[in-house]
Amino acid sequence: MDGNKMMQQVTAIFSVFMVFFYLGVGIYLAFFPSLSYLDKSVRVIIGSSFIFYGLYRAYRAYTKIVEVFFTKEDEDE
């Protein structure tokens, strides 16, 4: 395994952690009223943006993980 493939695998795993971060922040902003100094509509707009971006990152992370971990490389070098 070369260093480039290992770095791609580490990046793919890190992106999964970022998916959980974006979804967690989005759910927290959209559904928990503990940030009372922000208007509810602002919290819902920002929270839903985080949720949609987290879903997009989840799709991209899934495709990257399938590409990096589950596809064989041609070793005709």
Image: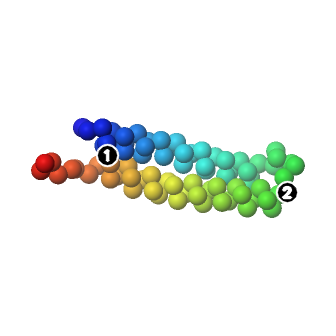
Q: Nearer the viewer, residue 2 or 63?
A: 2
Alpha-carbon neighbours of circle 2 within 10 Å: few (<14), some, or many (≥20)?
few
Query: Which residue is labeled 2 in the image?
Result: 39
Q: Look at 37% across and 40% down and name the residue there.
A: 7
Residue 44 image offset from top left, x and y in percent: 75, 59
Q: Height in image: 55 above or below 25?
A: below
State the residue at coordinates (31%, 43%): 5
* Mark 1 residue type: Phe
* Residue drawn at 52 percent across, 42 percent down: 17
Name the residue furthest left. 76
Residue 52 at what x, y percent from top left?
60, 60
Residue under label 1 = 69
- From the viewer's perspective, tell me whether residue 8 is left or right of residue 47: left
Q: Secondary structure at mark 1?
A: helix
Provide the secondary structure element on which disc 2 rests: loop
Amino acid type shown at disc 2: Asp
Residue at the extreme right:
37
Residue 18 or 34: which is nearer the viewer?
Answer: 18
Q: Is residue 30 above or below residue 10?
A: below
Q: Position of residue 62 (x, y in %)?
A: 42, 53
Give the quarter of the image for residue 43.
bottom right
What whole-number distance in Å separates the C-alpha atoms at marks 2 and 1?
Answer: 43 Å
